[in-house]
Amino acid sequence: MKNEARDFEPQYEVINSNDEMKNAMSIQAGDVKRTVEHLALLKDAVSQIMKKGLNHDYGIVPGAKRPCLLKPGAEKLMKIFGLGARFIQTNKEVDRYENYAEFAYKCEVYHLKTGIVVAECEGTTNSWEKKYKERAIYKDRVVVGHEKTPVMDILNMLMKMAQKRALIGAVLIATGASDYFTQDEDDIEALEPRKVEKKKVDPSKFETKKGKTDHALYIVPCGKFKDKKLVDIGMKDLKDYINHIATNNDKLEGPLKTFVDTAREYIRDSA
């Protein structure tokens, strides 16, 4: 068996001199030609995508120096250059008790005709990212609060996102398109600093003519009793609704918090 194994050992050309080493490592005319042709093809492909692929193949994110390559655009580049992709899962963590999940995939982009891998990139995602950590609670099509997202509800979404990130990164490397596009817009938006201004409730909504605050005249901005004055809501119904909101929301903010605080003041005034 050992003799048979030797028959399949690859044979390597031995380079004996410095001149031969230089020749082997030097750039040939054919290499330059292929590179120029590749860049011309890439430029034409990107030009077509930029003209016809708006909102599908790439996106524009404020603050980003280059357009962001999206999954459809990456798939078009692969088709143009005769490339394929395969995914290898490199990490998976799912803890339903801690409400946490994490996935990592490596994407290998290869040449369809030869099967040679030309680029690799790994993408990860987890349930504690800002976009997945919480989800909105709706009542009559109005957001009345937020809750922690049950991780078991978004496992497939997390896996797909990790694969997408790996794919886009690998395609950018394989096609040399980084001069034209940057990373996926989802990643850029996650890194963008967001300036959140606190919404101020118009005092005129619950002030009397004398300028004194009258919580009874406060107009509910959202939820079950939207556009109603507190005075027009039954006291029992109001108390039950406030208790429901407080029980189902770990963190109150924005108009919902203002409503709850004002309603509590109104209840205390009425006691």
Image (cartoon, grey):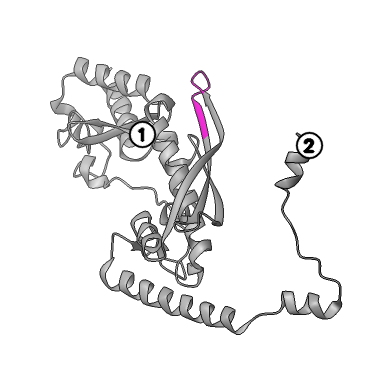
**84 above or below 270?**
below
Crowdedness of circle 1 by 10 Å Cα count: few (<14), some, many (20+)?
some
* Residue 31 in the image, given as x and y percentages of width and height: 58, 78
Instruction: Give SS at disc 2.
Output: helix
Q: Amino acid at mark 1?
A: Arg
* Residue 17 in the image, given as x and y percentages of width and height: 86, 76
User: Sequence order check: which comes first, mark 1 or mark 2?
Assistant: 2
- The answer to whether 201 appears left or right of 209 in the picture is right
Q: Which mark is residue 66?
A: none
- Nearest the viewer among 227 and 216 is 227
Name the residue: 26% across, 69% down: 52
Residue 100 within the magenta-colored segment of the rendering? yes
> Which region shows up in magenta?
95-102
Q: Which mark is residue 135?
A: 1
Q: Which residue is mark 2?
A: 2
**212 above or below 39?**
above
Task: Please identify the quarter of the rendering in which residue 249 is found.
Answer: top left
Q: Amino acid at mark 2?
A: Lys
Label 1, label 2: how far apart the Cα atoms are: 62 Å
Name the residue: 45% across, 58% down: 113
Q: Which quadrant: the C terminus?
A: top left
Disc number lying in front (1 or 2): 2
* Residue 251 visible in the snapshot: yes
